[in-house]
Amino acid sequence: TGTTVETDVVIVGSGPAGSSAALFLAELGVPTIMITKYRWTANTPRAHITNQRAMEIFRDLGIEEQVLADATPHHLVGDTVFCTSIAGEEIGRIRTWGTRPDREADYQLASPCLTVDIPQTYLEPILVRNATERGAQTRFSTEYLGHEQDDDGVTVQVRDRLTGHAYAIRAKYLIGADGARSQVAADLDLPYEGAMDIAGSMNITFKADISALVDHRPSVLYWVIQPGSNVGGIGTGLVRMVRPWDEWLIVWGYDIAEEPPVLDDAAATKIVRDLLGMPDLEPEITGYSLWGVNEMYATRLQRGRVFCAGDAVHRHPPSNGLGSNTSVQDSYNLAWKIAAVLRGQAAPSLLESYTEERAPVAERIVTRANTSAREFADIFEALGVVGLDGEAMAAAIEERKADTPAGAAKRAALVKAMETKNYEFNAHGVELGQFYESCAIIGDGTRPVQPPGKEDPDLFHAVSTSPGAHLPHAWVGDQTTRLAMMDLAPYHCWTLITGVAGSAWEQASTTVAAELGVPLEAVVIGPGRAVTDLYFDWAKLREVEESGALLVRPDKHIAWRVTNLPDDPAAALRDALTRLLGRA
Ligand code: FDA
């Protein structure tokens, strides 16, 4: 007692949101202390699908290779199976996470990275290690107790759980990345929509080498439709790969209106045997727990000097694989803004853009994930198993084989129902299409336009340079290097992108950067310049003239664009940047 430690930012939580926030702030040189309640990172595999935007962030931070080294690679994630059990009959498959050749083109054109699978048990240590190496202080076994904020900062009360010693940390800002039961969010009294615990679910982790049953149809997900699978849970039973092909996690539901089921080794073993269809299997059960499905998002993510990120502000089932990804992306949006305000480069009003930009994302992903879980009903309806259980259910599934009008109708209905699952497994627009409207964007009245034949904004990503959109991907470089467009715009600075006819922007950027004391680099794309447009793709994507410019924020969103070189580019740029930084 009596001790007070000082830092710039306190982060509560070392999950994907907290550990990535620590990494981003450390990368930007901001003094940071990350505290976390337990002695180490996640102790169960939890979130795993790691989408293109999250991988781009890891690429930006120079840890993409570390993540890939521990991940199950893209080519093994996508042959997703629906079956009556792993050893039993297959009902059908769907190519997922952009692995169907036509969709893979969309994914490859949109990003230098592809979706991979890395469980939290592998990802979090990478984030924590790199954050700590780059300067963050990490305090395990340290619990957040409460905070008080005033005009100058936040005093955070914490307790070392080993010694029982309570102490205070005085900081400029606090980030609550303390998960779905966030105490920081509760203390802030953040407003929420939706409800917690709308369905009952359980996770069972186990080891069993079942390569022979799966390695010819490699996937992260094997969905099981059998008696009991339409009760609670996340749509139907799930056997999820943790490590190919001998470590697994089962998700199985229960009726939340009833007493919670008793889960012990015997009960877990029975569920594993049933879903695998291997009654004699002796799996090594490594863990089990009950959890509730949530459908809840915050409509405000901050108050004053305190921000919440990750599951603290969006709580939803794992459907669409958005939990960990969105948590990392929240922190990526927030950290550079905090750094800019701490350095006096931006006014504190810039921080308001965090809620303006990320609250709509929270609503969108919570709604999408829960809708996806409910849409399994289409498959149950197609199979005619709604309301059925036991042998009646098995008979209804069997009927899809019959050479009868009912059998034919079932087969046709299945084709349609399976299409719906693209909204869970190939929702490229949801994964990538985050478009911001806020005080940190100078909109020009345009929005990304869906390409012809790809009108659905959930399934398809609309590439655009409209202010608020993410910088489009193209490959650029020269005879010795190949870079992604995002590589030109690193996290530690603002980047102005132009073409050869816009070379005057270089001097304008140097002038304005010096005047405002803001890190800003201009990149001219064209022959003989920093990089060339290797495949002539960028010329078709940039949506401005060669002499125009795109001003890209550290998080790769386009903040402002100009179609042509103005008479006084420095004045135009100065005006834009001062507005964006809240200094106008
Ligand atoms: P996260 O919950 O990961 O981290 C919270 C952090 O806060 C932890 O480090 C914790 O120690 C810390 N903390 C909490 N209270 C604290 C306090 N008072 N003081 C100090 N530290 C405190 N998703 C998915 O896609 N597929 C899945 O299969 C699963 N399965 C799953 C299982 C279980 C058991 C859970 C809890 C969650 C999942 N999830 C999941 C969800 C997924 O794990 C989730 O979306 C992300 O972990 C969210 O990341 P955050 O960093 O926001 O919170």
Image (cartoon, helix red, strand yellow):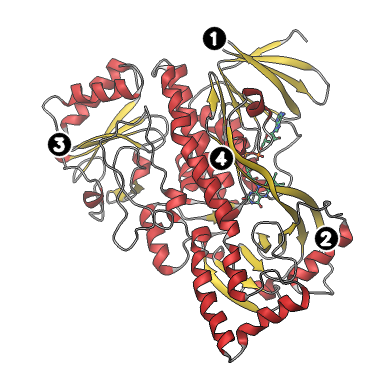
Q: Is residue 72 above or below residue 55?
A: below
Residue neighbourhood size for the residue with mark 3, other residues' Cα within 10 Å, grouped as few (<14), some (14–19), many (≥20): some
Residue placed most toward the observer, 412 or 75: 412
Q: Position of residue 337 (x, y in %)?
A: 45, 26
Q: Residue furthest left?
A: 567
Q: Is residue 494 above or below residue 365?
A: above
Residue placed most toward the observer, 54 or 387: 387
Residue neighbourhood size for the residue with mark 1, other residues' Cα within 10 Å, grouped as few (<14), some (14–19), many (≥20): few
Q: Which mark, residue 564?
A: 3
| Residue 374 placement, left or right of 146 | left
Between marks 2 and 4, how big is the CA–CA gap? 30 Å
- Mark 4 CB in 8 Å range of ligand 1? yes
- Is residue 140 in view? yes
Element class at badge 1: loop
The residue singled out by tag 1 in the image is 152
Foreground mark, 3 or 2, reads 2
Quadrant position of residue 124: top right
Residue at position x 48%, y 36% in the image = 358
The residue singled out by tag 2 in the image is 268
Element class at badge 2: helix
The disc labelled 1 sits on which kind of residue?
Answer: Asp
Element class at badge 4: helix
The disc labelled 3 sits on which kind of residue?
Answer: Asn
Q: Residue furthest bottom?
A: 403
